[in-house]
Image: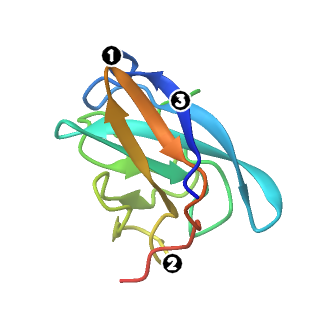
């Protein structure tokens, strides 16, 4: 059974803007995740770089590079595609863990029933 949980209002996620953080349970641990908007679509990922298990933010809720083109790890410069979580450069070791989102009636929801798994490319 899908458990849809309200995350934020649609207007809280601006194109290439600040991420909206939230917590998920992954591998039995409570972990930080984030949602962003890229090319008009909302996306969410576990906030954990695949190079070293550190959060990506270079300032609170800032995960995009200066141009809003890549998700960038502040610690070692690993870059990820905002639409897929796939490694785009730097010391990535696989893709980010994707979290299912949806939008309806001005609200962004995350779906907790989906198994969170690292993306394989």
Q: Looking at the picture, how far across and down is residue 31, in whole percent?
A: 73, 50
Q: Are the two marked residues, 1 and 2, in contact with CB atoms closer than 8 angstroms?
A: no
Q: Looking at the picture, how far across and down is residue 15, in whole percent?
A: 25, 28
Relative to the observer, which residue lies in front, 102 or 31?
A: 102
Residue 57 shows up from this direction: no
Question: Is the image coloured rainbow, by chain, by secondary structure, or in one colour?
Answer: rainbow
Instruction: Determine whether 24 is above or below 28 in the image.
Output: above
Which of discs 3 and 2 lies nearer the camera? The answer is 3
Q: Looking at the picture, how far across and down is residue 102, in whole percent?
A: 37, 42
**Left or right, residue 114 beside residue 38:** right
Element type at mark 3: strand
Residue 76 shows up from this direction: yes
Instruction: Determine whether 21 is above or below 3 in the image.
Output: above
Disc with the residue nearer the chain's start (1 vs 3)? 3
**Which residue appears at 23% of the width and 35% of the height?**
67
Q: CA distance from mark 1 to mark 3?
A: 13 Å
Q: CA distance from mark 3 to mark 2?
A: 31 Å
Disc with the residue nearer the chain's start (3 vs 2)? 3
Q: CA distance from mark 1 to mark 2?
A: 33 Å
Relative to the observer, which residue lies in front, 105 or 16?
A: 105
Please tell me the numbered disc located at residue 93: 2
Please give the residue where the numbered disc 3 appears in the rendered image: 6
Q: Are the two marked residues, 1 and 3, in contact with CB atoms closer than 8 angstroms?
A: no
Quadrant of the image containing the C terminus: bottom left
Disc with the residue nearer the chain's start (1 vs 2)? 1
**Which residue appears at 58% of the width and 58% of the height?**
1
Disc 1 crowd, CA 10 A, few/some/many (<14, 14-19, 20+): few
Disc 2 crowd, CA 10 A, few/some/many (<14, 14-19, 20+): some
Element type at mark 2: loop
Q: Looking at the picture, how far across and down is residue 8, in whole percent?
A: 48, 23
**Left or right, residue 70 beside residue 21:** left
Please give the residue where the numbered disc 1 appears in the rendered image: 11
């Amino acid at each position: 059974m899908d458990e849809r949980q309200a995350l934020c209002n649609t207007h809280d996620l601006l194109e290439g803007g600040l991420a909206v953080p939230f917590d998920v349970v992954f591998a039995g641990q409570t972990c930080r995740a984030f949602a962003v908007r890229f090319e008009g679509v909302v996306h969410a990922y576990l906030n954990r770089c695949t190079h070293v298990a550190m959060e990506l933010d270079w300032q609170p809720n800032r995960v995009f590079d200066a141009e809003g083109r890549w998700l960038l790890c502040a610690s070692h410069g690993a870059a990820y595609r905002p639409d897929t979580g796939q490694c785009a450069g730097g010391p990535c070791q696989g893709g980010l863990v994707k979290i299912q989102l949806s939008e309806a009636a001005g609200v962004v929801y995350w779906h907790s029933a989906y198994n969170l798994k690292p993306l394989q490319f």
